[in-house]
Amino acid sequence: MTRLVLAEPDRHMRRRLQQRVDALDRAGEVIDAPVERLPFPDATFDTAVVTLVLCSVPSQEAALAEIARVLKPNGRLLFIEHVRSHDPKLAKRQDRIRPVYNLVGCNPNRETLAAIEASALRVESVRHGEVPKAPKVERPMIVGTARR
Ligand SMILES: C[S@@+](CC[C@H](N)C(=O)[O-])C[C@H]1O[C@@H](n2cnc3c(N)ncnc32)[C@H](O)[C@@H]1O
């Protein structure tokens, strides 16, 4: 049986997530846990997914270490994250605007791919693209997979 566990500490997001899970035709559980302290033993999951989360966590290093811990050997992380631009001019704009984004807990200027590469995960595939319709500073995006 596939077990779907979704960790979401924000109560508004959690409520929306619960509605989506209830509408699904499979077992799913929404838990209230920060990604840095997932209440699961080592090597529990085949797959972990982060979408626009590594831009928000206080420490990417701590988040990725915990994700690596709960993944089974050869387990996969799927990620979609908006990241620091390769264009130095846009990266500078991302740095300038960061204090504003910090008010909503987001850092649009992070070197997230480097953080994944520096973790216990091995990047398997990555595509650089743009978040559609987002403000320019939020557009640079990576989509990819990494293995434990
Ligand atoms: C930009 S929102 C993205 C929401 C959703 N994942 C999506 O793709 O639409 C950032 C999310 O990161 C979550 N988040 C922030 N810090 C977190 C942490 N320490 N542990 C787990 N989730 C966290 C927030 O609760 C929020 O849902």
Image: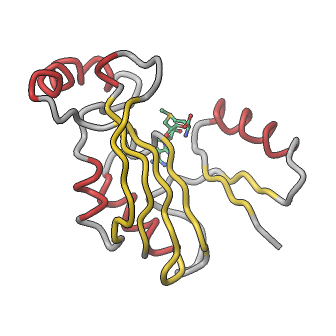
Q: Residue at x 43, y 72 (%)?
A: 147
> Is residue 139 depicted above or below 69 in this figure?
above
Q: Position of residue 2 (x, y in %)?
A: 78, 69
Q: Quadrant of the N terminus?
A: bottom right
Q: Quadrant of residue 92?
A: top left
Depth check, front residue: 138 or 105: 138
Q: Quadrant of the C terminus?
A: bottom left
Q: Residue at x 32, y 73 (%)?
A: 120
Q: Position of residue 13 (x, y in %)?
A: 64, 34
Q: Residue at x 45, y 75 (%)?
A: 69
Number of callouts in the render?
A: 0
Q: Quadrant of residue 46?
A: bottom right
Q: Position of residue 86 (x, y in %)?
A: 17, 36
> Is residue 53 depicted above or below 116 in this figure?
above
Q: Tell me if 65 is positioned left or right of 86 in this view.
A: right
Q: Tell me if 30 is positioned left or right of 89 in this view.
A: right
Q: Position of residue 108 (x, y in %)?
A: 30, 31
Q: Residue at x 29, y 48 (%)?
A: 112
Q: What kind of colouring is applied to the model shown?
A: secondary structure
Depth check, front residue: 1 or 130: 130
Q: Tell me if 40 is positioned left or right of 145 in this view.
A: right
> Is residue 49 depicted above or below 69 in this figure?
above
Q: Tell me if 6 is positioned left or right of 128 in this view.
A: right
> Is residue 47 depicted above or below 55 in this figure?
below
